[in-house]
Amino acid sequence: MRTGIFLFGGVEMDDVGAGPPAPTERRFSQKEMWQATERIIDMGVLSDSLGFDSFWLTEHHFQYEGYEVIPNGILIGAILAERTERIRIGMAFNIVPQWHPLKLAEDFATLHNISGGRGILGVGRGTVPREAEVMGSRVGSFDNPDQAAADDFNRRHFDEGMQVIRMALDQETFSFHGEVFDFPPPGIPDRGGFVDELTLVPRPLYPYEVWQAITSPPTLQQVPRWGWGGVFWNNHHSFVKTRWEQFAEIYEEAHSRPLARGEHRQLVLCTCVDDTHEAAIESVRDGHDEFWKFLGPYGWSKGYMGPDGKPARAGLIPTLEESIDQKTWVVGTAEEVAETIAWYDSLIGLENLLLFPAMPGDSYAEVDEQLNRIAEDVMPLL
């Protein structure tokens, strides 16, 4: 089992929980946000020293509230590559419609090569209208009144962007002419001739993996057909099993070979480890509630199961007890956390596991402790 660590990367907070303040009422200084960035890098170095397989960052913009302060995980990943020895470095996720696709391809290839082949290309479509609308795209967020039209444009933008990125990374020369992108556009003069194809510099010197979050039925159909890895997070355990198996069926149909146990699929689990079950519950409750106060309006709970056995309504704000019951949050002693991970392994076959051990607002001293508890107390039990 390859086990990685995923952090939102936010500012330490002393007022997290289900009640006030509202997320948009907080405003942190540039100094506080940069201090968080430095500590995030420290956590990547620690994860390397503790023997984790991978360390994943995320991409977000304009979040003065301090939840996610890394706008460019590839850039921070390059810093990590110079400070670490073996850990792989991924993004969960680069928001493709918010990038020029050729810039994303160039930057990823640079990270991948400078790290000796340790880069992981994690890609997504985005969830936050504030970011997408400003960065040149749209997004079908739950709180976007133009949700359907925005989602349609976002999908076309993403699909063409990824076609461009893969061609640029994988082919010596390429051209692409679609509805959204036109590379190279016609009529560009170049030393007595015209440009009709391009070559990306640099291109990857090592094989690389592509992973995308599985968040909707269309994505579940598309990702295995394209041959990428699928990331499953915040889904009721029965939904995980069903979608995990559907992914394998679609992959086999598209590529004429069955997937090996757990191949091309990764599970994300939110975790908190403490000396007793009760201490872990007390420790994580406020951070859990802050997580959902922050992300509930974007529709992140649609992978939960509602009372009728169907996906929960968008906008649900679950309690910690509900999250534990859904098995999206794994909270307790090292033995309890290991037992639930082993249960998932027997249910679906875990070859790729990504742990989310830091809730919004947690101090980095707490994150450090959680990383050590997982590495020293949980992993030996698996």
Image (cartoon, helix red, strand yellow):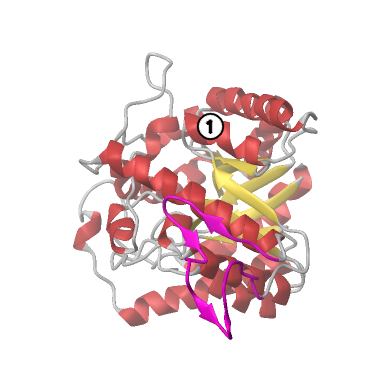
Depth check: 73 or 190 in front? 190
| Quadrant of the rendered image containing residue 131 | bottom left
* Snapshot quadrant of residue 14: bottom left
Chain part drawn in magenta: 173-201
Q: Is residue 198 magenta?
A: yes
Asked if residue 177 is positioned above or below residue 189 in the image, the reply reads above
Vertical order, 178 against 182 (above or below)? above
Which of the two residues, 219 or 335, is positioned nearer the viewer here? 219
> Residue 158 placed where, x, y %?
47, 50
Residue 91 picture quarter: bottom right
Q: Where is residue 62 in the image (x, y as percent from the top left)?
A: 31, 67
On screen, residue 84 versus residue 19, left or right, reads right
Task: Return the residue at label 1.
Answer: 327
Relative vertical location of residue 20 with respect to residue 258 in this rendering, above or below: below
- Find out whether residue 140 is within the magenta segment: no
Numbered disc total: 1
Depth check: 295 or 374 in front?
Answer: 295
**Farthest-out residue, front:** 192
Query: Which one is nearer the viewer's eye here, 302 or 155?
Result: 155
Q: Image quadrant for the N terminus?
A: top right
Residue 371 visible within the image: no
Residue at image coords 59%, 71% = 106
Image coordinates for residue 149, horizontal then vertical, percent: 29, 40
Label 1: how many Cα within 10 Å (few below 14, some 14–19, many 20+): many
Q: Position of residue 159 (x, y in %)?
A: 50, 47
Q: Is residue 254 something one can see in this rendering?
A: yes
